[in-house]
Amino acid sequence: MYHIALAVSEREFDRCFPIMLELRPHLLASKFVQQVQRQQQNGYQLAYLDDQELVKAVAGFRLSECLASGKFLYVDDLVTRSSDRSHGYGEALFQWLINYARAHNCQQLSLDSGVQRFIAHRFYFRQRMEITSHHFALKL
């Protein structure tokens, strides 16, 4: 039986790193804990799903509010270990995020996804998500 929790300790952050690395290959293990702790100062949280003491999926998210959407939960990162995909772990963690958002009176759950991530897009459509806008960026 799996378990979902918020990572709060350095040990838990370290356990999440190998899975997060699959989504964010530019990250360095030596700097990951400090980066998560720094982002926590701006509301970032890291949730993980483990099954039999092995982390299978990770989600980085934050609560925010804006004029366009009201209060919302924004998913920065959502990834399941590649060898554990299609076992329901991602869906379970996604449902946990929805429940967390509702419990915190959010009107919306949102995320951005790279245009090349077709498999992820199919997953989001199965979760009843809709494409509601385009995200634009300018590297500085």
Image (cartoon, rainbow, N blue to C red):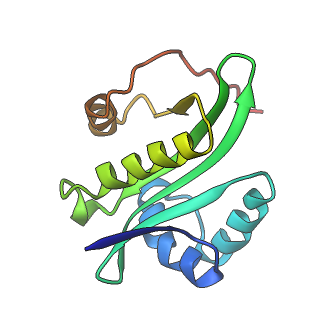
User: Which quarter of the rendered picture does the C terminus lie within?
Assistant: top right
Image check: 75 left or right of 8?
Answer: left
Please identify the quarter of the rendering in which residue 38 is found.
Answer: bottom right
> Percent position (x, y) of residue 63?
67, 43
Where is 110 relative to 89, above or below? above
Please tell me which residue lies in front, 75 or 71.
71
Please give the name of the residue rendered at 81% of the width and 58% of the height, measured from the top-left corner.
41
> Percent position (x, y) of residue 70?
68, 24
* Residue furthest out toward the left: 86
Please identify the quarter of the rendering in which residue 67 is found.
Answer: top right
Image check: 128 left or right of 38?
Answer: left
Please tell me which residue lies in front, 5 or 58.
5
Image check: 89 left or right of 5?
Answer: left
> Percent position (x, y) of residue 90?
32, 53
Please give the name of the residue rendered at 56% of the width and 46% of the height, measured from the top-left corner.
103
Where is 78 relative to 50, above or below? above
Please identify the quarter of the rendering in which residue 68 is found.
Answer: top right
Please tell me which residue lies in front, 3 or 77.
3
> Percent position (x, y) of residue 104?
62, 44
Where is 104 relative to 85, above or below? above
Please give the name of the residue rendered at 46% of the width and 33% of the height, measured from the top-left corner.
114
